[in-house]
Image (cartoon, coloured by chain):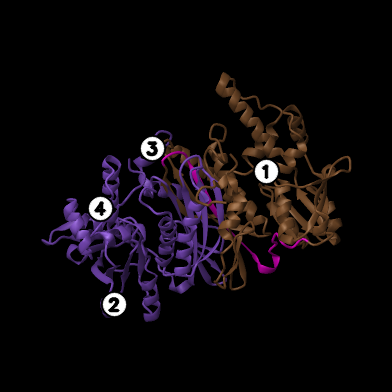
Chain colours: A brown, B purple
Amino acid sequence: MDPAKDTISSIGEFGLIRRLTKNIVLKNKSSVTGAGDDAAVLDYKGRSIVVTTDLLTEGIHFNLVYTPLKHLGYKAAVVNFSDVFAMNALPRQMLVSMALSAKFSIGMVDEIYEGLQLACERFGVDLIGGDTTSSVTGMTLSITAIGESAAEDLVYRNGARINDLICVTGNLGAAYMGLQLLERERKIFESTGSQPELAGFEYLVGRQLKPEPRGDIIQYFREQKIKPTSMIDISDGLSSELLHICYNSGKGCKIYASKIPVDPETAKLAAELHIGSMVAAMNGGEDYELLFTVSLEEYKRISEKPGISIIGHVVDESEGKLLIDDDGKAVELTAQGWNSFNE
Amino acid sequence: MDPAKDTISSIGEFGLIRRLTKNIVLKNKSSVTGAGDDAAVLDYKGRSIVVTTDLLTEGIHFNLVYTPLKHLGYKAAVVNFSDVFAMNALPRQMLVSMALSAKFSIGMVDEIYEGLQLACERFGVDLIGGDTTSSVTGMTLSITAIGESAAEDLVYRNGARINDLICVTGNLGAAYMGLQLLERERKIFESTGSQPELAGFEYLVGRQLKPEPRGDIIQYFREQKIKPTSMIDISDGLSSELLHICYNSGKGCKIYASKIPVDPETAKLAAELHIGSMVAAMNGGEDYELLFTVSLEEYKRISEKPGISIIGHVVDESEGKLLIDDDGKAVELTAQGWNSFNE
């Protein structure tokens, strides 16, 4: 490979991150872990602080044609809270940076902030600062969220053990199908001027525009004193996230297509658009549900809780990373998650 | 005013920030202070954590025609460390987010990271994470730096008292003149193809492309047990920063043009370009020196230290915020600092 000529798309986002972070050595006692999980972990006098950041750019992560600015602000905040929850920590503070081109009015910025502040109120987070500046074209939003936890409660990606249950919250693929619908209607509107036809699929649109991170599940874990062995939030699709857990834990997995939760609206639109609903669930992304593994001993308390599905179990690395389809056929998982560098 | 129609440039960056932050109330016990200083302050079990973030966009904050990528990475990191130092804290961790368009090769990203890592090594900071994604056009860099301090050592913008000495480190206006030179040579190159002529002004170019934040001064404060009463780093020009301290402290100031440190190269190029060197020092920005106030009792230890200039003193608010020129004439300070929203 030739770094001077090869494009970023040739190695992908994860390849780029691995390349950029492979030589990093943490030196400060307060730096517990750095890149490679949902959030970095700091330790100041025994209290763990997790920090995570996300950069959203117009035209790549959002399209203002169908994204209300208040929703954009809300989503930008909660996707970061989702990363904090995925560490089994609680979000406490947030910093927001925005670069805006000349086309944005003050009222538009106000709307973004309304969404940011609504998210902060709902999840008990303080907006403590940031940076506001201009851009040549388009909008960029950069959010940093800070959360806290007792050190012993933190859950990383690398703790999955053989025979652990693999679980997901909510249902998968809905946010992706919502995006397909919005994109279809945008194209129709742009070529014919017809108003968008979203009736019957309000749930999918809501899942795309206003995701809800699973703080309620973290609360349940605390009440029940359940500690998952590994956890990650589903931002890039189940397949990609499960592979992260497998690679980081040095394990394999076996999950069952029949057990993966899919909402009827997701299935209905998937059929209409000739997309397999399993493709949407496995590779769709942006659901911001939690994927976690727990000890078999937790079977009763996990299976009793509405909104959690047990989809499979952890196996030895040598057995592979497998999806068992409805006919009992095993398919090797591949990461076809959403990759912003794909051309 | 009409938020739906007024542009951001009509209220400026500071107006926008005030507007966006005026209703924010901090709720978490661990959130000590939020927006309104160089960095937010968190308190976890008595240890204070400061967090600051900056967003840099191509074409606004940097021009890749004359900014080597390694320098860009270095500068993006250290301007955040400068904010941490300005709280009298030490930087410990950093998160980096980047949005890149298709024109960037892997080698180019490597160069940016070399600069980021050099800055981290020099200042003992751990790079703990971030986000890397794509953009439609150009590059955006978002950096979040985290620092720590004992709570009682933190220095805010609001502590200046009447009769305190007003001090600056290093010299002012050099980074601004460096930028003027680079811009002049860029225009000549673009219209005639002539190679840039930077001889004799290497110091100014270095000040623009590779600023050095004053961790050494913070170290001196610690060794000498000096605690400034207020402090800020000079990113927008002396005038703007001094007004921040005056407004936040509810005080006035009297500073003397003859005492403001200006490097001979700055004065020489300012004369050549018909820019007053005092204009460059007062309004130029990007020097990343420290502006602070200290008690009169510290006069001896401050005046003995090479690289610190005492430029005036704090007065009652009713006396105004004044610059006394070489003829003894008093001029009211105005914030003409660099404003990225100016059209």
* Nearer to us: label 3 or label 2: 2
Tag 3 residue: B7
Tag 4 residue: B197
Q: Earlier in the sequence, mark 2 or mark 4?
A: 4
C-alpha separation, residue under disc 3 versus residue under disc 1: 35 Å
Foreground residue among B12 and B55: B55
C-alpha separation, residue under disc 4 versus residue under disc 1: 52 Å
Viewed as shown, does residue A141 lie left or right of B36? Answer: right
Tag 1 residue: A285
Numbered disc 3: secondary structure: loop
Query: Do the numbered discs 3 and 2 sit on residues whose CB atoms are within 8 Å?
Result: no
* Magenta residue span: A136-160
Tag 2 residue: B305
Chain bearing mark 1: A
Query: Do the numbered discs 3 and 1 sit on residues whose CB atoms are within 8 Å?
Result: no
Q: Is residue B90 visible?
A: no
Chain bearing mark 2: B
